[in-house]
Image: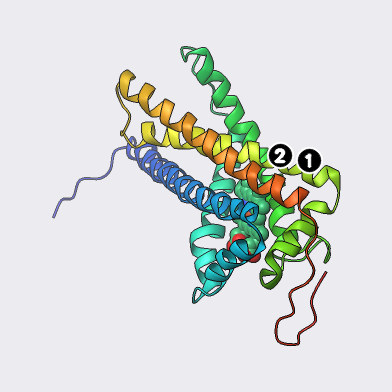
Amino acid sequence: MSTATAPDIAFPLLGGRYHFLLRRLHSLTGIVFGGYLVVHLIINATIAQGGGVYQQQVDKIHSLPWLPVIEWIFIFLPIIYHASYGTWIILTGQPNNASYPYVKNWNYLLQRVSAVIIILFLAFHVLSLKYDVFGKALFFDPHQAQRTIVLHMHFSPVTAWVVYPIGVLASCFHTANGFFTAAVTWGLAVSAGGQRRWGYLCIAVFVLLFAAGMVALVAAATQRVPGPIHTGGGPAIG
Ligand code: HEM
């Protein structure tokens, strides 16, 4: 058994290792949330195909066993950790490296600005659609999927044409730029050529993701409010 005592240098090293793990967890939870957003926006884009198709997708999700447990483990806890640790990164200020090329300096700043927008957007989006905090006109009923998301988008022009476009834009940028930096963090895009090719792919991810979000938004904001679906005698909402 060794009797050697740890040198003073062990404290900063241990702190450094802890910091490293927290940063990796931050990156990992960002990838999980980004993956969720890709699926979420594509599913919501099916609103454009009509209420029947959209309702089928929502039914598939809501027929999953243990849905609240799945949502908390794969969506809410990763987001809460990612947002909390990300806020700490922003507040403690990680100075930008002056030797970065111009575009990366902008991306560094925009990643932080979009993070703040997403936190505000998500608070409104999730509290209204999932937890009915802002009343029935903004609430989402999974049994009346098209009707209630169309009502949500018709609530006010500001919601549909200011809050949502900004929220979707910020989310798509943050996700695509986060995918780029994650590949660098995990050592998957190391060389200049590799980073350039991965950068092009991330731009494609941004464009497709933003297009899916806007298809969902424009469809929901411009469709006529459909009549309620009567399901087995229960009162229809809205
Ligand atoms: C036009 C675009 C969007 C539409 C139509 C939309 C629609 C919805 C709907 C209907 C729900 C409730 C789902 C349910 O209860 O089954 C929901 C939840 C949620 N949305 Fe969105 N969303 C959009 C954009 C976004 C964006 C940009 C983000 C990310 C920042 C996001 C993140 C979430 C989260 C985290 C939830 C709660 C998770 C859950 O459903 O369990 N959404 N959204």
**Would you place residue 97 above or below residue 174 in this image?**
above
**In the image, what residue type sits under mark 2?**
Pro
For the point 56% across and 55% down, the residue is 43
**Would you place residue 125 above or below residue 213 in this image?**
below
**Residue 193 image position (x, y, % from top left):** 31, 19
Instruction: Please say which color scheme the image uses.
Output: rainbow
Circle 1/circle 2 CB separation < 8 Å: yes
Nearest to the observer: residue 163 or residue 5: 163
**Residue 164 image position (x, y, % from top left):** 72, 44
Judged from the image, the secondary structure of the residue bearing numbered disc 1 is helix
Q: Quadrant of ligand 1?
A: bottom right
Q: How many marks?
A: 2
In which quadrant of the rendered view does residue 120 lie? top right
Identify the residue position indicated by label 1 in the image. Answer: 161
Is residue 162 shown left or right of residue 122? right
Tell me the tag on residue 201: none
- How far is the residue under mark 1 from the one under mark 2? 6 Å
Identify the residue position indicated by label 2 in the image. Answer: 165
**Would you place residue 69 above or below residue 99 in this image?**
below
Around disc 1, counting alpha carbons within 10 Å, would you say few (fewer than 14), some (14 to 19), or many (20 or more)? some
Find out if the beta carbon at label 2 lies less than 8 Å from the nearest ligand 1 atom. Answer: no
**Residue 147 image position (x, y, % from top left):** 75, 64
Around disc 2, counting alpha carbons within 10 Å, would you say few (fewer than 14), some (14 to 19), or many (20 or more)? some
